[in-house]
Amino acid sequence: MVIRSVPRYRSSTTMRKRGDPMRILILASVCLAAGCGAAEEKAADAPAAAASMGAGQWETSFETTAFRSTDGKTPLIKAAVGEKATSSACLAAGSESKPEPAVLVGPAYKCTYQPGSYIKSGRLNAQLNCTRDGKGPINISLSGTSTADTLDATAETTSFLAGDGDFTMKQKILAKRTGPTCQAPAAADGNSTDASASASANANAG
C-alpha cells in the first residue's frame, strides 16, 4: 500500500491564481483614482476659454519691437525699439466683433476696418486703414487671440504717405479689460459724455 504525502503548503502559483481577482480589483481602484486626479489636474491647468473681447473699459499696452524709415526721410512718428506706451479706451456693448479701433491701436490713429477683418471666437485677424495727424494712408495689420478679459496680439504698421516720412513698425500688444462699464471722458466744456454711445458710433462708422 502506497501512501501519498500531502504538501503542507499550497503552491505559490495556486495562491496567485486565487488572489489575482482581488489584486486586479485593488490595482484597478488605484489606477482609477490616479486617473481622476490627473483629470482634475488637467482641468485646473487648462487655459481660459477663448472668447470675443467683452464690452467695457480696456487698458492696452504697446511695445515697439521693430521700427525703421522706408523712404530714408525722417519718419512721420517718433519711435524706438523697446519703447512702451499705454492707453485706455471703451469697447461698447454690441461692438465686440468690431471694437473701437482705439482699443487695438491707441487713440493717435483714426481708422476704419477693411473687408475681411475677423474678430470672433477668440481670434483676431484685422486690417485697418488709418490716418495719423491727418496724414495717411497708414495700413495696420493685427493678428492674435483673446478672451473676454484679455488680448494678446501683434501689429504691423506700414505708411504710404503722399509726402516724406514713410515708416514700417511692429508692435506687441497686450490688453486687459479693467471694468464692465466704460469710463465717461470729459468733454471740452468739462461735462462728461456717454463713452459707450460715442464708441458705438465710431465703431459703426468703421
Image: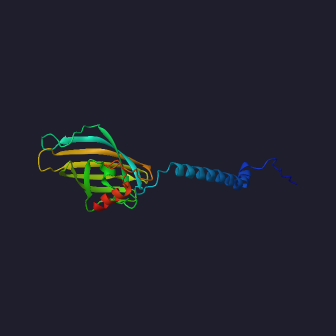
Residue found at x 66% / y 53%: 29
* Nearest to the observer: residue 30 or residue 171: 171
Residue 8's spot in the image, x, y percent? Answer: 82, 47
Residue found at x 34% / y 57%: 198
Residue 33's spot in the image, x, y percent? Answer: 63, 51
Confirm whether residue 91 shows in the render.
no
Q: Is residue 105 left or right of residue 44?
A: left
Quarter of the picture holding the C terminus: bottom left
* Nearest to the observer: residue 15 or residue 167: 167
Residue found at x 26% / y 57%: 112
Q: Is residue 61 left or right of residue 21?
A: left
Confirm whether residue 164 shows in the render.
yes
Residue found at x 47% / y 52%: 48
Q: Residue furthest right?
A: 1
Quarter of the picture holding the N terminus: bottom right
* Nearest to the observer: residue 19 or residue 184: 184
* Nearest to the observer: residue 39 or residue 142: 142
**Residue 172 vertical position relative to residue 145 in the rendered view, above or below:** above
Residue 27's spot in the image, x, y percent? Answer: 65, 51
Q: Residue furthest front?
A: 189
